[in-house]
Amino acid sequence: MEKTREGVKQVTTPYAVFWADDDFMVPRTFESAVQFLDENPDYGLAHGKCGMFNVEENGTQFPSNAFSFYRQGENFGETASERLLNHLGSYFVTFYSIHRTEILKKSIQLCKNFQWDYHFEELVPSCLSILYGKVKTVDGLYMLRERHADAGAWTKSQNMRDVFDWVINPTFAQNWEKMETCLGGEISKIDGIPLDEAKEIVKKAFWKRLAIVMNKKLKPATQSKSTMRQVLKKNKMLHALWMALRSFSWREQDRFLLPALQRKTSPYYQDFQAVYQCLVQDKS
């Protein structure tokens, strides 16, 4: 967080975006997002449609399931309280969105002041950004993120297997109290409500988020889905056919399957091809 804060301090442009070294970003969609923010001052963040890719497959070509959808949502709440409740009821990462620079600087500085541990360092900046303005998703390919096999390594390194281990960890209470104070204070100022009332909103939003995560952990997969996946994994031709059929679906997540992205009728075709050629060349 200290490095992030020092970097953000150097930014002099009205907008800023973080770009990770294992992600592809699309400048054309940056332009659309910035234009939208210019025209809509009540919005603080903007991004486009995003996908994920896996480079750990064998061979020089990617299988049809190597690409998938990465959800970047919208938030149209009129108040900071409403936006926070919406956000933690349907969470998405805002870290790689285009920010108004003053919002990003303020969020990062607050996080530096409160000194979160690792498990709050994504959650709290995301919530802070949401408090300061609405969020828009423009229609264009914005980013492709690399999916890592060790994506959950940070939890293992902290001896945390899941959200339950996080909640019962001794540091949780300390960080939660700081989060409640930080977000509650900002909501109180933005919405003009008493601090105690603002803190209750933070608590309601946060426990809504935890309830959703825990419910997903407890919900068993259906037997039919499990059986179908096993069959598809054993038969590559059948799996490829299934992916191809899914790619014609209207669902957003299916529009980011490789067969859909490579189809010239895809709205993301032109930008995706530039990224895909880089990936294929890198594998070879």
Image (tube, rainbow, N blue to C red):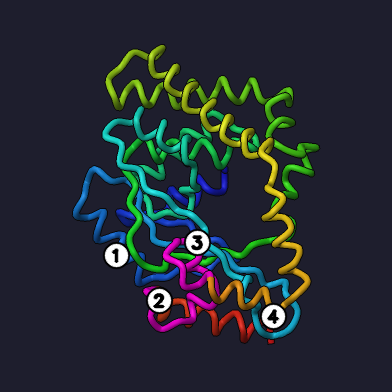
39 sits left or right of 271 in the view: left
The tag earlier along the polypeptide, 4 or 1, is 1
- What residue is pinned by disc 3? 253
Q: Quadrant of the N terminus?
A: top right
- What residue is pinned by disc 4? 237
Q: Residue at x 42, y 54 (%)?
A: 97
Label 1 close to label 2 by CB (< 8 Å): no
The tag earlier along the polypeptide, 3 or 4, is 4
Based on the displayed image, in which of its 4 quarters is residue 86 positioned? top left
Check disc 2: other Cα within 10 Å, few if <14, some if 14-19, many if 20+: some
Q: Give how far apart the Cα atoms at labels 4 and 2 are.
A: 24 Å
* Secondary structure beneath label 2: loop
At label 2, the amino acid type is Ser
The tag earlier along the polypeptide, 4 or 2, is 4
Q: Is residue 250 magenta?
A: yes
Residue 254 lies, in percent from the top left, at: 50, 66
Q: Nearer the viewer, residue 194 or 108?
A: 194
Q: Residue at x 36, y 35 (%)?
A: 83
Q: Residue at x 73, y 83 (%)?
A: 59
Q: Which span of residues is magenta-colored? A: 246-267
Check disc 4: other Cα within 10 Å, few if <14, some if 14-19, many if 20+: few
At label 3, the amino acid type is Gln
Q: Residue at x 42, y 70 (%)?
A: 26
Q: Give how far apart the Cα atoms at labels 1 and 2 are.
A: 18 Å
| Of marks 4 and 1, the one in the foreground | 4
Residue 87 lies, in percent from the top left, at: 43, 38
The tag earlier along the polypeptide, 1 or 3, is 1
- What residue is pinned by disc 2? 266
